[in-house]
Image (spheres, grey):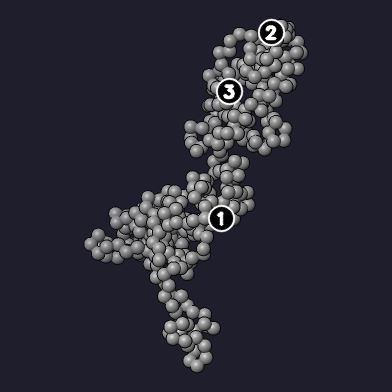
Amino acid sequence: MDGPYRQSAPHMIDDLKANPQRYSFFRAVDILLKASGQQVEERALQTQKVEDLIFRVAPGLGFPASDVVSLRPVDEEAGDELEMTVSFLGLHGPSSPLPSHMLETAAWSAGEEGVQQAFNDFFSNRLVWLFYLIWRKYRYYVRYNAGATDQFSDWMFSLIGIGGDESRGKADVPWAKLLTYLGVVAGRVRSAEMVSGVIAHAFSLPDVSIRQLELRKVEIPQDQRARMGSVNMSLGQDFVIGRFVEDRAGKFTVVLRNLTFQRFRDFLPSGKDYARLKELVEFLLKDQLAYDIELNLQRNEVPAFKLGCPDTASLGWTTFIGNTQREGLKPVVLQARG
């Protein structure tokens, strides 16, 4: 959402100050606020005003050529506080609702350096700020901050139970990418297609799937095992031979295919994304099922085996011996939760 073209680079600030008439009102204010780093919505809820930017309305009665008439510092020496003169939405000027004789008096007073314009601008400043905040309220692409740290994104995260920075800070998960899937994540159903789609989008992976109904062996608790002449010896009811029972209803596998070697290493237990992937999968699951993570490396990405090299000599993870093109490349399966 917050692409490079929206960044407030220094040259944009300089150009805005030199040629404010070239910018629309909303774009100009957006650039100034992003450059100052102020939390606009939090301040506006308290004072309906943001520091370092004051609005005035041009007193002239001519047809306005642009939204922004001028942009200059209030104090030439300090230069911290800016004053933006606009051509709309004021108690004087061409768009004022007041009678014409009052507008003419205000225009004359401005030329004679009277106090009427300053008095009107006391109210116009708040009015223009409210106008900007109303426009901003319904434009998420303007309110969005990198990393989904803005207030509206926080409200959206509340739909899936992770509203507030403290809730999201407990896990190192790319939460911002989950905004695309808020609708399905907030639902009660967790299908394999939904989980694989969220994982693929969150980690920018080309091919992710969920293999369901995986066979596993579950250990029978000691008090539930069959004991001759004691308990659990009814044939066809509770009698089971051995310490384990086969089960296909409690395990699945997250399959990652077509991985480059770098991405392959990222999802190993020593990689940067292994813990993040586990956190995301366990967040998406409603039932705490057992699961494995299967990593499939691209054939042309198989590294040459070198003793002593930590990247290619991790036994069982990155060690490949033989002709993988002819014999086939076996995936690496990691037990995430048993």
Give the structural element (helix, strand or loop) at label 2. Answer: helix
The residue identified by callout 1 is: 171
The residue identified by callout 2 is: 100
Instruction: Indicate the amino acid at tag 2.
Output: Ser
Q: How far, Cα to Cα, is label 1 from label 3?
A: 40 Å
Where does the image place residue 154, in percent across and percent down from the top left?
Answer: 60, 45
Left or right, 104 with reference to 232: right
**Residue drawn 52% across the image and 80% down it:** 221
**Residue drawn 51% across the image and 32% down it:** 6
Q: How far, Cα to Cα, is label 3 from label 2?
A: 25 Å
Where does the image place residue 244, in percent across and percent down from the top left?
Answer: 44, 79
Give the structural element (helix, strand or loop) at label 1. Answer: loop
Q: Is residue 84 above or below residue 165?
A: above
Disc assigned to residue 25: 3
Q: Is residue 38 above or below residue 116?
A: below
**Residue drawn 56% across the image and 39% down it:** 145
Q: Is residue 286 above or below residue 148?
A: below
Q: Is residue 168 above or below residue 128?
A: below
Of callouts 3 and 2, the N-terminal one: 3
Where does the image place residue 182, in percent across and percent down from the top left?
Answer: 52, 47
